Image (cartoon, grey):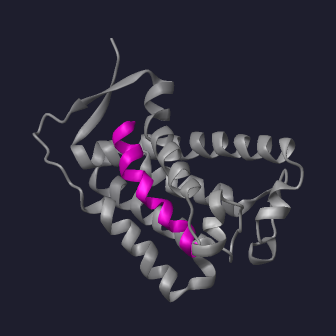
């Protein structure tokens, strides 16, 4: 979990492409308003990357074991998918949230193709993480009335709200969660095994 959190934290730079087109939250010291990125961006990705990397394993009561075939580490995907996102966001700056969905889907598809043993975990984690994140957003919107309307630029979305939450939020965590959920297993050549 810590490994995934540390590698996920730099992805906080993504807010640079999302602010103010998709959303415009308040931040410590007004950094997001000034620079399009804030401390919260990195803290958010640190926490979310860690959670999505272990949620499937935790719920299934599984542990990681090294692949028997002596697989070697593959770090290229950790760098490739963010580069895909940046390139797409430069080419299509007004579609940054959709670029993030597509980059996550590409990462998940590549992982599933190269490591077919992770397919089930990729799909299950995407659904589990989406439900968890959706629940958190509903709670935030209930605790802080108008949270979504205040911080999200809804005119730049599909306009589809599910219980007050933009469909894009669910789509992003679904595809990004699908990709990041197995990044440790793919990168470090591990697989899951039931605890005995």
Image coordinates for residue 184, horizontal then vertical, percent: 32, 44
How many numbered dots are placed on residues in this image?
A: 0
Quadrant of image for the N terminus = top left
Q: Is residue 15 above or below residue 122?
A: below
Apparent side of residue 68 relative to residue 109 in the rendered image (left or right):
left
Q: Residue at x 47, y 80 (%)?
A: 88
Extreme bottom residue here?
91
Apparent side of residue 111 relative to residue 27 in the rendered image (left or right):
left
Apparent side of residue 72 relative to residue 17 in the rendered image (left or right):
left
Extreme right residue here?
145
In this picture, which residue range is highlighted in magenta? 1-17
Q: Residue at x 37, y 73 (%)?
A: 83
Extreme top residue here?
196
Q: Residue at x 49, y 85 (%)?
A: 90
Image coordinates for residue 3, horizontal then vertical, percent: 33, 41
Extreme front residue here?
29
Q: Is residue 151 above or below residue 8?
A: below
Residue closer to the observer: 137 or 163: 137
Q: Residue at x 51, y 67 (%)?
A: 14
Image coordinates for residue 142, horizontal then vertical, percent: 86, 43
Apparent side of residue 76 relative to residue 26 in the rendered image (left or right):
left
Q: Quadrant of residue 38?
A: bottom right
What secondary structure do most residues of the magenta stretch adopt? helix
Instruction: Say if residue 182 shows up in the picture.
Output: no
Image coordinates for residue 196, horizontal then vertical, percent: 33, 11
Instruction: Say if residue 121 shows up in the picture.
Output: yes
154 within the magenta span:
no
């Amino acid at each position: 979990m810590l490994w995934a959190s540390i590698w996920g934290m730099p992805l906080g730079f993504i807010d640079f492409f999302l602010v103010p087109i998709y959303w415009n939250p308040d931040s410590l010291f007004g950094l997001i308003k000034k620079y399009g990125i804030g401390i919260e961006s990195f803290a958010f990705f640190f926490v979310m990357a860690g959670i999505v990397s272990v949620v499937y394993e935790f719920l299934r009561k599984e542990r990681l074991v090294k692949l028997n075939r002596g697989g070697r580490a593959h770090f290229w995907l950790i760098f490739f998918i963010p580069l895909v996102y940046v390139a797409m966001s430069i080419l299509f700056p007004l579609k940054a949230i959709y670029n993030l969905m597509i980059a996550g889907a590409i990462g998940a598809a590549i992982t599933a193709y190269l490591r077919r043993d992770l397919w089930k975990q990729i799909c299950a984690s995407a659904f589990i993480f989406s439900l968890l994140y959706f629940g958190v957003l509903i709670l935030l919107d209930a605790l802080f009335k108008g949270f979504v309307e205040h911080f999200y630029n809804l005119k730049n979305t599909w306009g589809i709200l599910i219980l007050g939450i933009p469909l894009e939020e669910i789509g992003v965590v679904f595809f990004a969660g699908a990709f990041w959920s197995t990044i440790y297993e793919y990168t470090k050549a591990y697989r899951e095994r039931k605890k005995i």
